[in-house]
């Protein structure tokens, strides 16, 4: 298959080949355990895949720490090796691998797209578009690119496909959402005349900003997911891999902590305890505080990697 | 960096999926979680991916559950369908049973009915044969007696016997004397006191008229045939065969002048009664006896004085009456025994089994109930007797209001009344109008 071959060639060119960094015994063990031979992969192709997966992340270790054989084995045992081999075999253009991929993932891919979009038509369109890209029909810099090359075995291939579909759907929605006509948006009501002293409001706004900014990432994630995204406790708990009671408890704890912190900040600003509690009863619409901006204060500089196109 | 320019710096699908599947290390998970706390786009991606995974799992679980449950559901539905199927099967079985039973009864009737169409000579019961002295000096029959000859058996007596009735044809070759006597246009006179039972107990092939009587009595009310004009009695061919059994044997003996004295005496007395009262037939014989039964016993009035009428009929002790096989087959008594004597009127039938137990049926033999013995000795015979209003006056007080009295109202046509007579092994007689209550005579 021509497109796949070009993809394979591209992948080989991009991945630094460091055969010396891979433990031979581990490579042999993993080769016997995986289905690479069934999909037409050669042994050297398999070892190249392992290097491509392990080296960029240093086998889960901190950068600069050379992994030993045990650490390599531990890392690769946490990788969905069969899914990884199948994805790479498909990206390399092996016919049997594609047959397997279509037989196993074609229908689930369509179902996931329908579930994400909430529409059968949009779901089929989204799935077909991704399937075409997976087949290597998209070009970048004159070369065919296969998104399967970005899969490195952390998590299941099906999960990766779902996440990819969700990314494309959200990005498409965010792009098209900006083009919605404004007449569908209700005009906000006129602001009532301010009766609260501006100094007290300013003090309260600062106190809230300091309290929210001081929370850790997990609490901010919970607050954002629950209050901004209006996700349910079950959805948040499922994303975090915890029980929803845990999420509820953490949310309650976070809100109480923020309230106490705000009171402390207000008292620190010169208000009495009673005045600070009265200040908390101010209509939120009087506050010049954007909680969304507070919660979504940039913490994403660490992710310089860009999502696959 | 604000939310607006985060679009270019998001974790890839690999990391987000690994985060959602708890496949990241602590350090990397914290990094992704920090990003998720600040990035609504990636939170949305993770939530949508998890929703799709849950939907996919639900679909697979539903399919697996359906595949696992479907056979059991089919079996459960099959059992649900079994109940109405069983009910239907029972209904069909009942229908078939009733149908088969009706077919058997009709076949029995059909077997009896053609035999009743044999020549009248053979239909004459033994009791109708006059005594020798009667033959020598016959009593003049009154004019109303002429219609009495409009009996089915007599009217059909001229018909040639069918090939399927060899026994009946053979029997017609032994004409009793009284047939010759009535050939001269008067017609066959119904004999007095000829019990229905006697007709029934004779073999059907030997006693076609008796079977006509049976048919008329048992089924006459269902299809009352019009009275048939009496054709001249056929000349009986010579060489009559001996009757097969029971009463029929007596008939043959009488025909040959060898009847028992008691029987001859009875016949004589009955003949005299008939001729003196001019009641050779019931006015509505056709209606009462069904298909125009010619049996004299069905049209017998009670011309004698009450004292004479209360005399029990003579029963030949030497040869007790036995039912014909065909009739016996048609009767299914609760005792499981064969019936030895049978009498019927309308829908009411009486039968005596081999042990002398009397059974009563009020639905033409479909169901039978035992009648408590109200007589002494062993019941051996039961027969029907018809009396008109005039005779009713002379009937015993116990029979002053017999069943069917509605027909006994005064009018140009007298309605007969039905009595049942029961004889024990000592020739004692009991009378009953309903078959349940019996009064000694």
Image (tube, helix red, strand yellow):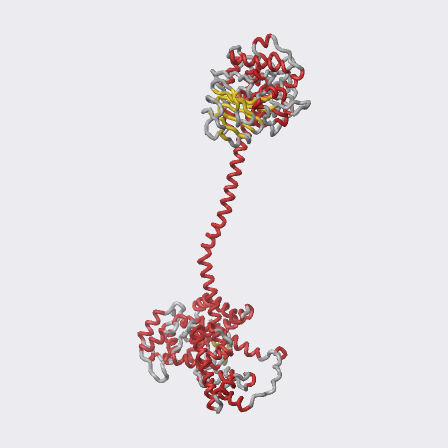
Decide: is B348 above or below B238: below
Residue furthest to the right in view is: B412
How many circles with numbers are drawn on the protein? 0
Decide: is A233 above or below A302: above
In percent of the image, x 53 and y 11: which residue is there? Answer: B256
Residue B297 position by quadrant:
top right
In percent of the image, x 57 and y 22: which residue is there? Answer: B397
Instruction: Give the x, y percent position of residue B151.
Output: 62, 20
Q: Is residue B153 visible?
A: no
Work out whether residue A285 or residue B412 is closer to the camera in this orientation and state it: B412
Work out whether residue A174 or residue B441 is closer to the camera in this orientation and state it: B441
Residue A91 position by quadrant:
bottom left
Work out whether residue B213 or residue A239 is closer to the camera in this orientation and state it: B213
Q: Is residue A78 left or right of residue B131?
A: left
Instruction: Give the x, y percent position of residue A276.
Output: 49, 87
Work out whether residue B55 or residue B253 is closer to the camera in this orientation and state it: B253
Instruction: Give the x, y percent position of residue A128.
Output: 52, 70
Decide: is B174 above or below A136: above
Q: Is residue B309 visible?
A: yes
Decide: is B96 above or below B411: below
Instruction: Give the x, y percent position of residue B43.
Output: 48, 77
In percent of the image, x 68 and y 22: which residue is there? Answer: B412
């Amino acid at each position: 298959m021509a497109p796949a071959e070009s993809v394979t060639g591209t992948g080989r060119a991009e991945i630094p080949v460091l055969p010396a960094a891979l433990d031979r015994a581990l490579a042999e063990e993993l080769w016997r355990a995986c289905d690479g031979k069934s999909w037409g992969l050669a042994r050297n192709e398999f070892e190249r895949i392992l290097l491509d997966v392990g080296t960029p992340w240093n086998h889960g270790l901190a950068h600069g720490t050379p992994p030993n054989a045990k650490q390599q084995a531990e890392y690769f045992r946490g990788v969905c090796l069969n899914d990884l081999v199948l994805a790479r075999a498909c990206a390399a253009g092996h016919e049997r691998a594609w047959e397997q991929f279509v037989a196993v993932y074609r229908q689930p891919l369509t179902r996931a797209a329908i579930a994400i979009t909430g529409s059968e038509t949009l779901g089929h369109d989204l799935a077909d578009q991704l399937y075409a890209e997976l087949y290597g029909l998209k070009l970048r810099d004159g070369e065919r690119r296969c998104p399967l090359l970005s899969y490195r075995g952390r998590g299941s291939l099906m999960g990766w496909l779902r996440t990819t579909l969700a990314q494309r759907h959200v990005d498409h929605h965010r792009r098209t959402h900006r083009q919605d006509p404004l007449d569908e948006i209700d005009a906000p009501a006129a602001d009532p005349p301010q009766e609260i002293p501006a100094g007290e409001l300013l003090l309260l706004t600062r106190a809230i900003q300091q309290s929210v900014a001081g929370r850790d990432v997990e609490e901010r994630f919970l607050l954002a997911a629950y209050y901004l995204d209006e996700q349910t406790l079950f959805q948040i708990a499922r994303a975090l891999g915890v029980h929803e009671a845990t999420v509820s408890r953490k949310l309650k704890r976070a809100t109480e902590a923020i309230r106490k912190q705000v009171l402390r900040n207000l008292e620190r600003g010169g208000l009495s305890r009673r005045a600070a509690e009265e200040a908390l009863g101010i209509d939120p619409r009087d506050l010049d505080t954007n909680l969304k901006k507070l919660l979504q204060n940039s913490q994403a500089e660490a992710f310089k990697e860009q999502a696959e196109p | 960096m604000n939310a607006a320019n985060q679009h270019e710096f998001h974790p890839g699908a690999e990391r987000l999926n690994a985060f959602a599947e708890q496949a990241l290390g602590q350090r990397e998970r914290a990094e992704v979680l920090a990003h998720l706390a600040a990035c609504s786009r990636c939170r949305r991606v993770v939530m949508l991916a998890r929703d799709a995974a849950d939907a996919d799992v639900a679909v697979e679980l539903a399919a697996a559950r359906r595949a696992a449950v479907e056979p059991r559901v089919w079996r459960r539905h099959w059992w649900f369908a079994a109940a109405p199927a069983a009910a239907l099967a029972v209904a069909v079985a009942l229908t078939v049973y009733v149908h088969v039973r009706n077919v058997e009864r009709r076949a029995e009737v059909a077997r009896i009915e053609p035999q009743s169409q044999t020549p009248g000579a053979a239909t004459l019961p033994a009791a109708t044969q006059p005594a020798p002295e009667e033959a020598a000096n016959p009593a003049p029959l009154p004019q109303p007696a002429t219609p009495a000859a409009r009996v089915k058996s007599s009217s059909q007596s001229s018909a040639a016997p069918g090939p399927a009735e060899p026994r009946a044809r053979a029997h017609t070759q032994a004409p009793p004397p009284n047939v010759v006597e009535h050939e001269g246009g008067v017609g066959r006179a119904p004999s007095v006191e000829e019990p229905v039972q006697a007709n029934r107990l004779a073999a059907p092939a030997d006693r076609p008229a008796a079977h006509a009587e049976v048919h008329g009595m048992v089924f006459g009310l269902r299809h009352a045939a019009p009275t048939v004009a009496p054709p001249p009695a056929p000349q009986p061919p010579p060489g009559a065969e001996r009757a097969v059994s029971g009463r029929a044997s007596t008939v043959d003996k009488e025909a040959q002048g060898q009847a028992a004295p008691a029987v001859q005496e009875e016949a004589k007395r009955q003949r005299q009664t008939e001729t003196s009262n001019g009641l050779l037939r019931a006015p509505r014989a056709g209606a009462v006896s069904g298909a125009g039964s010619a049996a004299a016993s069905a049209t017998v009035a009670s011309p004698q004085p009450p004292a004479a009428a209360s005399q029990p009929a003579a029963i030949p002790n030497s040869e007790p009456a036995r039912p014909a096989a065909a009739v016996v087959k048609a009767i299914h008594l609760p005792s499981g025994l064969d019936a030895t004597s049978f009498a019927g009127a309308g829908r009411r039938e009486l039968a005596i089994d081999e042990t002398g137990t009397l059974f009563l049926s009020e639905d033409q033999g479909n169901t039978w109930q035992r009648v408590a013995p109200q007589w002494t000795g062993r019941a051996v015979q039961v027969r029907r007797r018809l009396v008109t209003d005039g005779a009713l006056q002379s009937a015993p007080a116990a029979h002053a209001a017999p069943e069917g009295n509605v027909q006994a109202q005064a009018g140009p046509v007298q309605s007969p009344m039905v009595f049942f007579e029961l004889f024990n092994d000592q020739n004692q007689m009991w009378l009953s109008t309903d078959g349940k209550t019996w009064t000694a005579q």
